[in-house]
Amino acid sequence: MKATVFLGGGRITGALVAGLRLASFSQPIVVHDRNSEKLRQLKRQYNVIVETDLCRAVESARLLIIAVRPDSVHELLKEIGTIRRRLTVVSLAAGVPLSKLRAGLGVPVRWARAMPSPVSRSGQGLTALTFDRGLPIAARGEVRNLFALVGSVLEIPENRFDAFTVTYSSSHGYHALAALIRGAEAIGLDRKSARVAAAHALADGIAAWRTSNLSLKQLLQEAATPGGIAATVMASLDAGGYPEIIAQALRAGVRQARKNARQ
């Protein structure tokens, strides 16, 4: 039986495999990586099939997933060489466009790009997908169904992929949580209480927004009464340039994605 094959045994592969196992994905999963310790850990944790030979890994693939760093994609595709059978290949490399992927592995390989979240390990991930022209409906469905096992799936045009990539990362939430905890401790709250309060402010508030019939503007008005403490905090954030800092950071991420595309 052909397998779902990951080339690269790093963090995102670990997160996706964890989510697939949580979803009782029963088809064979093969992982190739040059780092034998990564392979041992994945085999121990998730009972994947490890393959140290790149050619054998590719040959065993029903669906091939490129899960290496963007700056390693070119060399990996060169090492793979020519594939003479029809094969759907999914790249997880941020910023590397379909045009460069096609140039690396030509016909009869068919390409898709996916941008999955590390939160996929819990089954609550979010994955953006974009498909190369000519990829058959059945192949698109197979890719979509795989990532749907680990969370929500959003299909978007490739020209919006970089903007999505810099916006959706769970690092935004983790970074904000860490900053809020540090700020609370700085004004005298103990660490345990700071963590509980900050987590409620971010996670529970956003969960309430997801299930509410109220708009984000309405919820913000409800939580930050004019003239009140919360409103004062929000006004201070805005006056300090918080919205501009976020926009500037997202633009920096897009520049990095475009740098990846040039490599």
Image: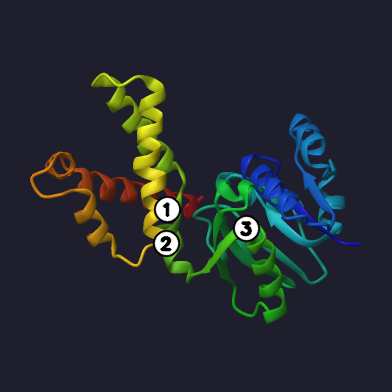
Q: Give coordinates of residue 30: x percent, y percent.
A: 81, 49
**Nearest the eye: 187 or 87:** 187
State whether residue 196 is above or below residue 213. Answer: above
Mark 3 Cα shell of 10 Å, populated few (<14), some (14-19), many (≥20)? many
**Nearest the eye: 146 or 50:** 146
Residue 7 in the figure: left or right of residue 246: right
Q: Quadrant of the N terminus?
A: bottom right
Q: Which residue is mark 3?
A: 91
1 vs 3, front mark: 1
Q: Residue at x 78, y 46 (%)?
A: 31
SS assignment at label 3: strand
The reply to whether discs 3 and 2 touch (Cβ–Cβ < 8 Å) is no
Q: Residue at x 59, y 73 (%)?
A: 132
Within the image, what quadrant is residue 104 found in? bottom right
Q: Which residue is mark 1?
A: 207
Within the image, what quadrant is residue 198 found in? top left
